[in-house]
Image (cartoon, helix red, strand yellow):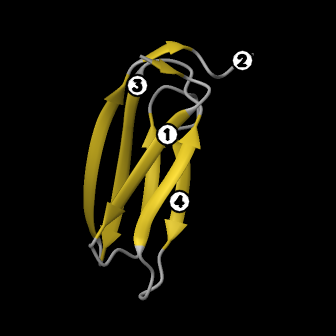
Amino acid sequence: AENGAVIPISFDSTLKARTVAIFQDSNPEATVAVFTITPKSVIDYAVRIKMQKTGTITVVADVDGTLHSVSKVVKVTIGGCGG
């Protein structure tokens, strides 16, 4: 059970990714964030997002054109996107 106004997301990786993106499928706009990674960067992020309802969060890493992803369903009991 999560409050949709504050969904914590954290991820790290040892992949040599060029780009890492966060997506979710519960709000009208699926893209949450896109990070451009430099060769000496460490991939270790923590962010908070809002979600309207229960949905899936997916983190995708682009490593030389090969996409690696991980997904998790987040149950939202109180919607965080008013309107």
Tell me if 51 is positioned left or right of 68 in this view.
right
Instruction: Kindly report which numbered mark, 1 or 2, lies closer to the viewer in this rendering.
Output: 1
Mark closest to the chain's N terminus, 4 or 1: 1
Pointer 4 local density, CA inside 10 Å: few below 14, some 14–19, many at least 20: some
Taking 63 as reference, is 54 above or below it? above
Quarter of the rendering occupied by the C terminus: top right
Viewer-side residue, 27 vs 11: 11
Task: Measure how far apart labels 2 and 3 are at the Cα level.
Answer: 16 Å
Q: Quadrant of the rendered structure where residue 6 is?
A: top right
Which residue has dot 1 on it?
Answer: 8
Relative placement, left or right, of 14 versus 54 is: left
Q: Position of residue 82 (x, y in %)?
A: 71, 17
Work out which residue is located at the far bottom of the displayed protein and give it.
Answer: 40
Marks 4 and 1 in Cβ contact (< 8 Å): no
Which residue is disc 4 drawn over?
34
The foreground one among 40 and 18 is: 40
Vertical placement of 34 versus 36: above or below? above
Mark positioned earlier in the residue sequence (4 or 3): 4
Q: Who's the residue at 49% across and 53% down the image? A: 46
- Which residue is identified by label 3? 55
